[in-house]
Amino acid sequence: MSGQYVHAHGVTSTGGSEWLRPGTPTLPGCFSRHGYASVGVGKMHFKPWDALSGFDRRVIADSKYGTSRGDDDYRRMLKERG
């Protein structure tokens, strides 16, 4: 996401309290600044879980965080088809 080596950004795992420091430049953020729409889709190991981390928008469907946070096209289709 950042194009940085681990020793530069300090994130050594996808669990726990570690994540990119606020303000760290990211590839989706670079795209957004240059006029592209960037959308993160699916599960990402962000802290907090709903952080944009440079994306303009995120589509999140993860039942771990409750039913209200995962209402997307795929879930609706699954529900309609049983």
Image: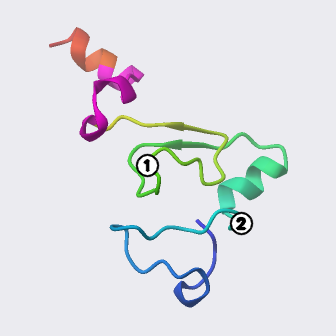
Number of dots carrying numbers: 2
Q: Position of residue 39 (x, y in %)?
A: 60, 41
Q: Which quadrant of the view contains residue 5?
A: bottom right
* Residue at the disc numbered 2: 25
Q: Which residue is pictured at 76% across the width and 47% down the height? A: 32
Q: Which residue is pictured at 40% across the width and 23% down the height? A: 72
Q: Position of residue 1 (x, y in %)?
A: 58, 65
Are the residues at dot 2 and dot 1 in contact (C-beta closer than 8 Å)? no
50 to the left or right of 37? left
Is disc 2 placed on a helix, strand or loop? loop
Q: Position of residue 27 (x, y in %)?
A: 67, 61
Name the one closer to the observer, 67 or 33: 67
Is disc 1 placed on a helix, strand or loop? loop
Which kind of residue does numbered mark 2 sit on? Answer: Pro
Tell me how far mark 2 sits from mark 1, CA to CA. 18 Å
Give whichever of discs 2 and 1 has the lower sequence position: 2
The span shown in magenta is: 63-75
Q: Which quadrant of the view contains residue 4?
A: bottom right
Q: Which residue is pictured at 25% across the width and 40% down the height? A: 64
* Residue at the disc numbered 1: 49
Q: Residues within 10 Å of mark 2 (few under 14, many from 20)?
A: some
Q: Residues within 10 Å of mark 1 (few under 14, many from 20)?
A: few
Which kind of residue does numbered mark 1 sit on? Answer: Trp
Disc nearest the viewer among 2 and 1: 1
Tell me: residue 21, above or below residue 68.
Answer: below
Q: Position of residue 80 (x, y in %)?
A: 24, 9
Q: Which residue is pictured at 37% across the width and 68% down the height? A: 14
Q: Is residue 70 magenta?
A: yes
